[in-house]
Image: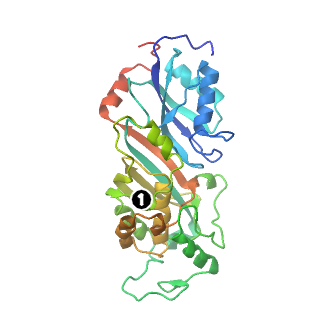
Amino acid sequence: MTDMTQPGGKLQIWKLTLAYDGTDFKGWQVQPGEPTIQGELRAALARVTGEAPLPQGSGRTDAGVHALAQVASFVLGARIPAENLARALNRTLPGSIRILDARIAPDRFHARHSAVAKTYEYRVFLERDSSASSIQRVLAPDFNRSEPEAGTVSGHDFSRAEREGRKEASAPEGRQSAESERPANCSPFLARYVYPCSWPLDLESLQAAAQQFAGEHDFTSFAATDPDQNQRNHDADPGDEPSSAIRTIFSSAWERRNIEEGVLLVYRVRGNGFLHHMVLNLVGTMIDMGRGYCRPEEIPAILAARSRAAAGPTAPASGLFLHSVEYGTAIADLCSRFPKDEMTR
């Protein structure tokens, strides 16, 4: 315990907002012998306060996934001004993890259970010298034509590597499309935070596919087997309904962003919850559609199949960010009423 903390009586619930580069971590959840965000945060709290609560995140981001504004909650007995806690944690945490905000939360606040919506963002990098063709309909199939011959999609000849990649595109979880023969020329200062894509992509097909995910659907076809499901069920509040693959997507869209190095195609999706690897599998499937391998009109059938094998491959984790987490107005109002430098309640 540092000299900034004071012994306390009643436990206080804390809400942290943090950002991190997930490249060198094995995800959020603590794992024996592995570097994780939750593990680093718990160890930092122990060094600063003398207590070691296990912070609960709004979501358990996977290995290699980043966060712009993850939210974590935990309880502390020590009394410490919020600004001092944030400052002290940032001094002892790795540079790839930063506390953006710390404040006392209302009773019963929980970073995951209290959340009403989350937004994820996925970034695909395209080289500038190929970006003009990459965002036009150069690979969009003519759906009125007969089925193309093997090794072609709508008359476009693919290399052996591309054909092998297509074979893997409908493979179950854990298998990704084969690498292109020519890797994308992506800056090393950007590569950790994007999926460097070598193939031309049809932005209109990506957009048409994204729009079909809006609304309430059963996303079983886009969910990986969750190794933490038993723990999630154990953590659920008494009376909660059994876990379901039904989620509501409020918005789902792609946009183009011009950057100095080339072009980013950015997918942003906002929903009331997400399944394990769901966003990565949505993106992998849409990239298949952007390459002309399948049509956006097939998405309803993929959803109805309720089978992971019906959807496309898993996109690399490097391009995925937890963008933001939303809470109900009542909780937000209560959090704002507690001064950030308040030491007692």
Q: How many marks?
A: 1
Residue at x 44%, y 51% (from the top left corner): 275
Look at the image and tell me whether residue 247 can be seen. Answer: yes
**Left or right: 316 in relation to 287:** right
The answer to which of 301 and 156 lies nearer the viewer is: 301
Tag 1 residue: 220
Quadrant where the image shows the N terminus: top right
The answer to whether residue 225 is above or below residue 132 is above
The answer to which of 118 and 174 lies nearer the viewer is: 174
**Label 1 secondary element:** helix
The answer to whether residue 67 is above or below residue 262 is above
The answer to whether residue 329 is above or below residue 282 is above
Residue at x 59%, y 19% (from the top left corner): 49
Look at the image and tell me whether residue 59 can be seen. Answer: no
**Left or right: 120 in relation to 241:** right
Residue 21 at x, y percent in the picture: 59, 44
Q: Amino acid at mark 1?
A: Thr
Residue 40 at x, y percent in the picture: 62, 34
Quadrant where the image shows the C terminus: top left
Residue at x 64%, y 36% (from the top left corner): 95
The answer to which of 243 and 246 lies nearer the viewer is: 243
Report crowding for label 1: few under 14, some 14 to 19, many 20 or more residues within 10 A (C-alpha).
many
